[in-house]
Structure formats: C-alpha cells, structure tokens
Image (cartoon, grey):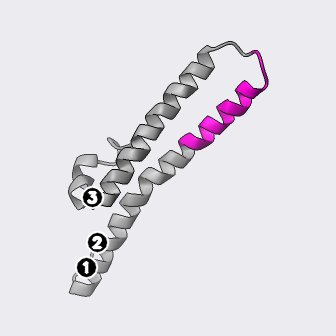
Amino acid sequence: LLIGAGWSVLKPHLSQREKRMVLVVLILQVVDNIALVVIDESDRGTVSVYTWTDILHILDIICCCLILMPIVWSIRHLREASASDGKAA
C-alpha cells in the first residue's frame, strides 16, 4: 500500500507524529500477516482457528484504513493552507 501510495512523494509532507503512526501500523500489519500465514499453515483442529483468522483479517483491514488516515490529514492540511494563502489547490 505504501509503494502504491507513493511513499517517497508523501514522506516530506507528513509530520513526525504521522510518520510514527505509519511506522507503528506498518509493524502491526507485518506481524498480523505473519500470524495469518502461521495460522493458515497449522492444522485446523479447533473452531477457534477460524475465529482467530477472522480477527486477524479484520485487524488487517483496520491497518489499511489507519495507513490512509495520515495521508488524508496531510491532504486536508494542504488544502486549508492553500485556502488561507488564497491559492487554489
């Protein structure tokens, strides 16, 4: 997602807090995907495996949404700054 979003283009426009949030979410997403692979490769002995798989898929979707939040905040901030300067965005 970060490569597709043009991380090198967005990185200079993100604040330190937003960069930290992206880093935390990225690490969480990597751990989540590793856990999904481990669960998929393990034996399906109990019903709780399906529950954990569902939980991890939901966590993955939440991580994708959280990655987009700093990008949206940055776009909104740039629009507000251009509106206050009188320049069109």
| Secondary element at tag 1 | helix
Name the residue located 24 percent from the left edge and 61 percent from the top edge. Answer: 13
Sequence-first disc among 1 and 3 = 3
| Secondary element at tag 3 | helix
To which residue does mark 3 refer?
16
Q: Amino acid at mark 1?
A: Ser
Name the residue located 73 percent from the left edge and 33 percent from the top edge. Answer: 51
Estimate how packed mark 2 is, as few (under 14), some (14 to 19) or many (20 or more) residues with alpha carbons within 10 Å. some
To which residue does mark 2 refer?
78
Q: Position of residue 47 (x, y in %)?
A: 79, 25
Name the residue located 47 percent from the left edge and 38 percent from the top edge. Answer: 29
| The C terminus - image quarter | bottom left
Q: Position of residue 49 (x, y in %)?
A: 71, 25
Q: Amino acid at mark 2?
A: Leu
Q: Position of residue 26 (x, y in %)?
A: 40, 41
Residue that protrudes farthest toward the top in the picture? 43
- CA gap between label 3 and label 2 equals 16 Å
On the image, which quarter does residue 80 sit in? bottom left
| The N terminus - image quarter | top left
Which segment is the magenta one? Answer: 45-60
User: 55 or 82: which is nearer to us?
Assistant: 55
On the image, which quarter does residue 55 sit in? top right
- CA gap between label 2 and label 1 equals 6 Å
- CA gap between label 1 and label 3 equals 21 Å
On the image, which quarter does residue 17 sit in? bottom left
Residue 62 in sight in this render? yes
To which residue does mark 1 refer?
82
User: 18 or 8: which is nearer to us?
Assistant: 18
55 is higher (above) or lower (below) than 88:
above
Tag 2 near tag 1, CB within 8 Å = yes
